[in-house]
Amino acid sequence: MTSAKRAGLPYDKKPPQRSGESIVVYHEVSDESFAFPVADRAMEPRFNVDDVVVVDPERQSGHGNFVAARVEGMEEAVVRQYYRADNGPAKLVALNRQQYPDITANAGVRILGRVVLRMEKVL
């Protein structure tokens, strides 16, 4: 990529609303990409609370990919790993499965896009 792309960063943690703020990422993303901070511990140790993920809604999400999703009844978007069995419904799976149950992808779940970049909070 020859130039930086921008992804909107909604500080209210409710993607894909646009806050007018932006970050520069040196990674190929679509113009519809957005970013938000991880709100829970479900994906530890890979994604920690307040790490910022960049999500590209135009990237195909497949088995094993990390995705962002809105789940009915949950206030904030979640990051989970997408699994699709050959003969069953897709599931959104947490890495920290002892504390966070699998989420069955049904009418109450909307996949927002594929996580393409994680920015770790250093301090």
Image: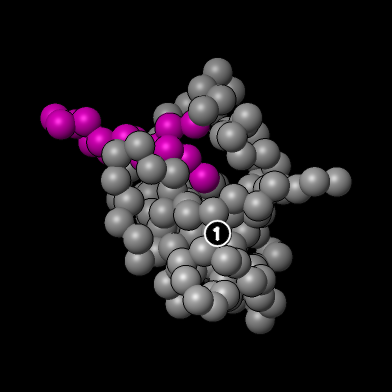
* Front-most of residues 80 and 104: 80
Q: Residue at x 29, y 45 (%)?
A: 62
Q: Residue at x 55, y 59 (%)?
A: 54
Against 55, residue 62 (above or below) is above
Q: Quadrant of residue 21?
A: bottom right
Percent of width and height locating residue 36: 62, 59
Q: What is the basis of the colouring in this image?
A: one colour
Characterize the magenta stretch by its predominant secondary structure. strand
Q: Residue at x 60, y 67 (%)?
A: 25
Note whether residue 87 is visible.
yes
Against 119, residue 1 (above or below) is below
Against 24, residue 113 (above or below) is above
Disc 1 marks a residue whose amino acid type is Val
> Is 81 situated left or right of 100 in this image?
left
Q: Which residues are magenta?
A: 79-94
> Is 84 situated left or right of 48 in this image?
left
Q: Is residue 21 magenta?
A: no
Q: Which residue is mark 1?
A: 54
Q: Residue at x 54, y 78 (%)?
A: 3
The crowding category of the residue bearing disc 1, from other C-alpha atoms within 10 Å (few below 14, some 14 to 19, many at least 20), is: many
* Front-most of residues 74 and 68: 68
Percent of width and height locating residue 118: 59, 50
Q: Quadrant of residue 9?
A: bottom right
> Is 36 situated left or right of 57 in this image?
right
Question: Which residue is outermost to the right?
Answer: 123
Question: Which residue is outermost to the left?
Answer: 87
Percent of width and height locating residue 10: 65, 68
Q: Secondary structure at mark 1?
A: strand
Note whether residue 73 is visible.
no
* Front-most of residues 102 and 51: 51
